[in-house]
Amino acid sequence: MNVLICNDRAEPLDSLIGILENNRDVTSVKVATNGRQAIDALHSSPIDISISSGTGLDFNRMLQRHIAPTVAASLTRVVATQSPTVPLFVKAHQFGFNNVLPLTTPEEKIVPSLQRTLSGEESIKDHPSVKALHLTPGALTHSISFEDTNDQHIVELVGVGLSDHEIAEALNLSIQNVRNRVAHSIRINQLTNRTQLALLQNTNWQIPDFA
């Protein structure tokens, strides 16, 4: 099992690195401390599992746009954090991660958990909080799509929190036209509600710094 750990200063994963480096079932452990290192590591040699911290969740999601599709398709992604919360489970699920690993897991159970995640036996979708919401996994990982420039302008204004009435007034459109276009944008982006549309729009605005 080849592992890449995206290690950040806000929530260091040094203890996890030590555990994996000393386990015979782990072939290699690469450590990246910034986006460029992570991208280079993923494209330079086979990586089975990428692990990021809870605080690095958003940044790791943004990296996905810079990974070759063939690499991304075979990559298992895990969030490792000390005390995972229900919101973190849901967010990780929506960002397309395969599992969440609590760092309170006994040392001898960490690698078996990663192996089960890699094989698909253990998954974030089986967490009770995620199952109860009936969410589509990875809904917020892709680039947002627009039917035309009017749709783009409407979604941009949804992203900054404007109501349908405010959007209609700003763009000189009927309220029903705005509502229809918002509903259409939700549908073509395979989302379930307006909040997800706003989140996807806002996450697409963010550009990671690979310096």
Image: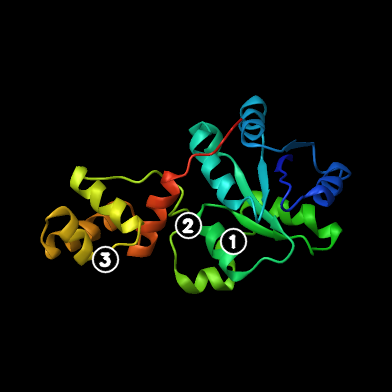
Task: Name the amino acid, label 2.
Answer: Pro
Q: How many marks?
A: 3
Quadrant where the C terminus is found in the figure: top right
Q: How is the image coloured?
A: rainbow
Q: Position of residue 122 (x, y in %)?
A: 64, 59
Q: Is residue 148 visible?
A: no
Q: Residue furthest front?
A: 170
Task: Name the amino acid, label 1.
Answer: Ile
In this rendering, position of residue 91 left or right of residue 25: left
**Circle 3 crowding by C-alpha within 10 Å: few under 14, some 14–19, many from 20:** some
Do the numbered discs 1 and 3 sit on residues whose CB atoms are within 8 Å? no
Q: Residue at x 37, y 57 (%)?
A: 198
Circle 2: element type: loop
Tell me the tag on residue 137: 2
| For discs 1 and 3, the disc positioned in front in the rendered view | 3
In this rendering, position of residue 124 left or right of residue 144: right
Q: Residue at x 22, y 49 (%)?
A: 151
Q: Residue at x 82, y 48 (%)?
A: 14
Q: Position of residue 59 (x, y in %)?
A: 58, 46
Name the residue carrying label 3: 163
Q: Residue at x 76, y 50 (%)?
A: 12
**Circle 2 crowding by C-alpha within 10 Å: few under 14, some 14–19, many from 20:** some
Circle 1: element type: helix
Q: Position of residue 187 (x, y in %)?
A: 27, 57
User: Which comes before the other along the chain, label 1 or label 3?
Assistant: 1
Question: Image height check: is 135 above or below 3?
Answer: below
Do the numbered discs 1 and 2 sit on residues whose CB atoms are within 8 Å? yes
Name the residue carrying label 1: 124
Question: Image height check: is 126 above or below 200?
Answer: below
In this rendering, position of residue 101 left or right of residue 205: right
